[in-house]
Image (cartoon, helix red, strand yellow):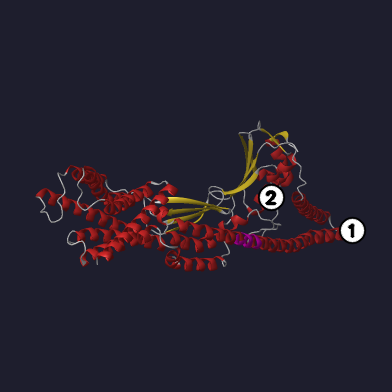
């Protein structure tokens, strides 16, 4: 029995020395406060375990007695140090922390100040009984608090971190039980003493597995995360958009590291997607993992940096796969947009051919018919009939000219062959000329509210193309009165064409400036090509300006042109 107890004692010494070595190595690598408390705790415990082989059972000399008191003080400090290790993750209330500090300091002082330590078989004085009770309460309460804190906090961690924290909690509980049971051990060579030694061994193994579990054990613990990672990789391959890829990968990422939240940011810092678990940790840790596609921001608990170092490596691996999936989804989106653009271009081409054929056929046919009638029967017609035919012929020629000019404008704008040459003009005079040129018969119904002294540097041709198209649009689709306003603000010319018609339906506003876009409700009653507003905006942008629509008050449509002072070509 004695040999068995001695063997167990040596094993315990080796185990606690190994734990101390692991903790010291962790502190040398991280230099963190948490690792420092763990290293101090187990170095002191290993020193106490070693002192049992160096100090005699009955110390006689002063040096031996001092060494015994130091060993007892170190043993007393172990639960305090391991408690500081656990509380370093989540600070406790200040009053409780001060109480623990004061109690530990008082017990250490009492250890140094005690008159003597009773020898084996000697009766205990009352003051030593109080000291032993305080010692046991101090040990058991602090170690149980450590066990409860680590066990409860581990519930929301990743599997490996949770198992490590549970091992430390069980080891703390076992060590507290070891001390309580050892008080009644009696004979140092009894079965009871062997049981106490084995209980200490169990505690040491738990601490060692908690601080440095073997690779095979980590692999077994990590099986749920590995399976989830494989499923996430499979789901990533089916993602077709960035948001879809992020939605599939962020939840398993959060599970792998026990994250409270995880956010995927783009290269410009915008949030692409995020995932929250609903568990808040004000003392948590925030890590930013940089990737080519952006940044993964991980919100973990305060325990994760110490217990979840390897899980971050899994995050990097999954993040690299996410990068490939995001690139794939972007390429897919680009291909889809390109296909939609080609389909839209083909649709526009078909619409253009049909519309051009229809719009050209109508005035050309009318011109041909009227001209043939005048040529063959002009002498037989009454002057009134001849004048009516000539008016109709002029109207159709003007319509044909307008359509040809629009088509030429489109070709010049597409080829970027429009040259902007600014010059100083009187805005009101120029707008009056445009109104009389566009609507000579309706000029009196178009109001011009512009200061006669207003001057601006603009390209005359661009201004004429833009305003004329806006006026034609107002006359065709709006109702009188039509008002043209102009003002200048910080060198930018603002021209507004406003009518009093029904306005633009809300569902058509997004297509208002598209080529060949015509509202179905007015297409049947109003002739047009659907090119005027597209040409107006294109000319405005060539002038580094813009044309915008807004509803007029109380009814109608208002189109505002903004033209900055352009640079000469």
Q: Give yes or no for residue 330 being in the magenta stretch.
A: yes
Look at 79% across and 53% down and name the residue there: 404
> Where residue 286 appears, x then y in whole percent?
44, 50
Residue that numbered label 1 is attached to? 375
Q: Residues within 10 Å of mark 1 (few under 14, many from 20)?
A: few
Say left or right for 179 vs 455. Answer: left
Look at 27% across and 59% down and name the residue there: 175
- Above or below, 434 against 89 in this view is above
Camera-side residue of 106 and 96 = 106
Give residue 5's mark.
Answer: none
Q: Which residues are magenta?
A: 328-335
Whether residue 469 can be seen here: no
> Where residue 420 appears, x then y in whole percent?
74, 40
> Where residue 71 appears, x then y in whole percent?
26, 48
Identify the secondary structure beneath mark 1. helix
Front label number (2 vs 1) = 2
> Where residue 543 appears, x then y in whole percent?
70, 42
Q: Residues within 10 Å of mark 2 (few under 14, many from 20)?
A: some
Say left or right for 278 vs 513. Answer: left
Q: Main SS of the magenta segment?
A: helix
Residue that numbered label 2 is attached to? 472
Distance (Cα) linking label 2 and label 1: 32 Å
């Amino acid at each position: 029995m004695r040999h068995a107890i001695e063997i167990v004692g040596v094993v315990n010494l080796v185990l606690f020395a190994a734990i101390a070595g692991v903790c010291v190595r962790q502190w040398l690598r991280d230099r963190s406060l948490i690792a420092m408390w763990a290293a101090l705790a187990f170095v002191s415990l290993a020193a106490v375990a070693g002192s049992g082989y160096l100090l005699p059972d009955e110390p006689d000399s002063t040096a031996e007695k001092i060494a015994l008191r130091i060993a007892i003080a170190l043993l007393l400090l172990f639960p305090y140090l391991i408690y500081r290790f656990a509380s370093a993750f989540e600070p406790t209330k200040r009053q409780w922390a001060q109480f623990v500090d004061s109690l530990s300091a008082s017990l250490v002082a009492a250890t140094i100040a005690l008159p003597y330590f009773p020898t084996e078989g000697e009766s205990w004085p009352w003051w030593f009984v109080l000291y032993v009770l305080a010692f046991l309460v101090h040990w058991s309460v602090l170690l149980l608090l450590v066990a409860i804190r680590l066990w409860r906090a581990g519930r929301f961690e990743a599997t490996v971190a949770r198992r490590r924290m549970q091992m430390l909690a069980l080891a703390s509980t076992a060590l507290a039980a070891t001390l309580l049971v050892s008080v009644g051990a009696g004979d140092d060579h009894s079965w009871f003493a062997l049981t106490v030694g084995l209980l200490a061994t169990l505690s040491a193994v738990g601490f060692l597995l908690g601080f440095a579990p073997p690779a095979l054990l980590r692999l077994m613990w990590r099986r749920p995360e590995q399976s989830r990672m494989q499923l996430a990789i499979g789901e990533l391959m089916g993602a077709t958009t960035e948001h879809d890829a992020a939605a599939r990968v962020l939840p398993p990422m959060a599970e792998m590291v026990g994250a409270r939240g995880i956010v995927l940011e783009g290269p410009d810092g915008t949030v692409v997607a995020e995932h929250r678990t609903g568990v808040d940790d004000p003392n948590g840790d925030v890590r930013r993992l940089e990737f080519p596609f952006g940044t993964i921001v991980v919100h973990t608990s305060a325990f994760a940096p110490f217990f979840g170092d390897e899980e971050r490596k899994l995050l990097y691996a999954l993040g690299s796969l996410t990068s490939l999936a995001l690139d794939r989804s972007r390429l897919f989106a680009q291909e889809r947009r390109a296909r939609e653009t080609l389909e839209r271009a083909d649709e526009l081409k078909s619409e253009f051919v049909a519309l051009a054929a229809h719009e050209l056929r109508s005035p050309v046919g009318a011109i041909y018919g009227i001209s043939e009638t005048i040529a063959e029967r002009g002498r037989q017609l009454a002057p009134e009939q001849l004048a009516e035919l000539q008016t109709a012929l002029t109207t159709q020629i003007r319509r044909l000219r307008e359509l040809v000019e629009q088509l030429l404008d489109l070709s010049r704008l597409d080829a970027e062959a429009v040259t902007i040459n600014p010059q100083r003009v009187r805005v009101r005079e120029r707008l009056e000329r445009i109104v009389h040129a566009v609507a000579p018969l309706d000029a009196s119904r178009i109001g011009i509210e512009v200061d006669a002294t207003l001057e601006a540097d603009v390209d005359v041709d661009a201004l004429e193309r833009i305003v004329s198209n806006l006026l034609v649009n107002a006359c065709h689709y709006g109702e009188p009165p039509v008002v043209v306003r102009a003002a200048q603000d910080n060198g930018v010319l603002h021209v507004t064409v406003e009518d009093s018609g029904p306005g633009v339906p809300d569902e058509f506003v997004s297509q208002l400036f598209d080529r060949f876009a015509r509202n179905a409700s007015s297409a049947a009653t109003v002739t047009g090509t659907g090119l005027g507003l597209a040409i107006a905006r294109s000319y405005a942008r060539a002038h580094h300006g813009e044309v915008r629509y807004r509803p007029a008050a109380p009814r109608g449509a208002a189109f505002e042109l903004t033209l900055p002072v352009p640079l000469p070509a």
